[in-house]
Amino acid sequence: MNDGCREIEAEINNMLTIKNADYEQLRRHGEETYPFECCGVLLGQFTGQDRVVQEVVGCGNTRADRPQDRYHIDPKELISVQRQATGKGLEIVGFYHSHPDHPARWSQTDLAEAHWLGCSYVITSVDSGVARDTNAFVLLGDTEENKRLENEEIHVASPVEDRTICR
Amino acid sequence: MSLRVSIPTPLRRYTEGAGLIEVSGESVAAALQSLTEQYPPIKQHLYNDEGRLRSFVNVYVNDDDIRYLQKTETVVRPGDVISIVPSIAGGSGR
């Protein structure tokens, strides 16, 4: 777990496992698009209550009107990512985006616009162009009416574990 | 060649895990009705109380958004893939 996760003190019952290289890739994406929000898709597998990321796919942010504090992924791009995933035997297990100069906590906008129940939403704060904290939240509930984002532990696999995940 | 609907990850819990479902119908509306008849619990996730597609549910026929075609009356043919894509958006929202 990275230092940024320590500020999340609530009970954590879910876990997102991600290779170190993929974890660094999504954090770097937030630095590259700073001062605008980045966004992308996490491909992998569901294992019980947890998600295991096998691949990170960066996407474009279509919110040209206010990219500094909003993101949106073109559904057409997502369909393309979905096709790639299916071809590799992977599923969409979550998404990521950055919060430029803003904490790595979900906002009311993040919750209102989250619709992929059971998937992870990873947020990285980027302060003055440098990725700081990365936190994960899982969208729980059965319907739009009772959905909620809950804290999720991020397990960043070491290079040795990376090879195990890739197997 | 069959007409199929691509199911997003969160809705696969209602299709016994299947990501592609064969449906019948000559329009998007008919194809989605075929889907909801096969898997009734999926309906509430696609439609609001007024029976309209929920605003965050994007529907594509192959690579085209039905909002820019004839919406749910868009004609579909065997071999087409209808994709259901819940929107992905958010932001720090200061």
Image: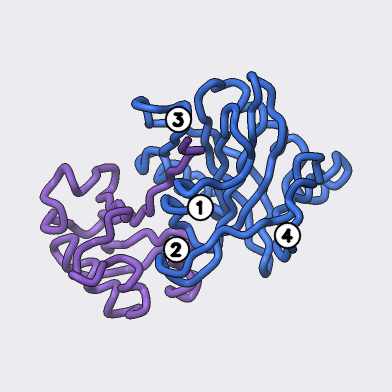
Mark toward the start of the polypeptide (4 vs 1): 4
Instruction: State yes or no: discs 3 and 4 in contact (Cβ < 8 Å).
Output: no
A55 up-or-down from B79: above or below: above
Q: Earlier in the sequence, mark 3 or mark 4?
A: 4
Where residue A30 sits in the image (x, y, percent)?
60, 28
- The earlier-in-sequence mark between 3 and 1 is 3
Give me the residue at 78% from left, 45% from top: A156
Residue under label 2, please give it. Answer: B19
Instruction: Locate residue A32: give its quadrant.
Output: top right
Cβ atoms at labels 2 and 1 below 8 Å apart: yes
Q: Is residue A52 visible?
A: yes
Q: Amino acid at mark 1?
A: Thr
- Kindly report which numbered mark, 3 or 4, lies closer to the viewer in this rendering: 4
CB within 8 Å, label 3 to label 2? no
The residue lying furthest to the front in this view is B94
Q: Are marks 3 and 4 on the same chain?
A: yes
Q: Which residue is mark 1?
A: A86
- Quick check: A151 left or right of B6? right
Where is residue A48 drawn, in percent x and y?
A: 67, 69
How many angstroms separate mark 3 from mark 4 (CA)? 32 Å
> Chain A appears what colour?
blue
Which residue was labeled with disc 3?
Answer: A60
Q: Which chain does the numbered disc 3 sit on?
A: A
Q: What amino acid is labelled 3 in the image? A: Gly
Q: Is residue A95 above or below residue B7?
A: above
Disc 3 is placed on an element classified as loop
Q: Which label is found at residue A10?
A: 4
Question: Which colour denotes chain B?
Answer: purple
Q: Chain of mark 2?
A: B
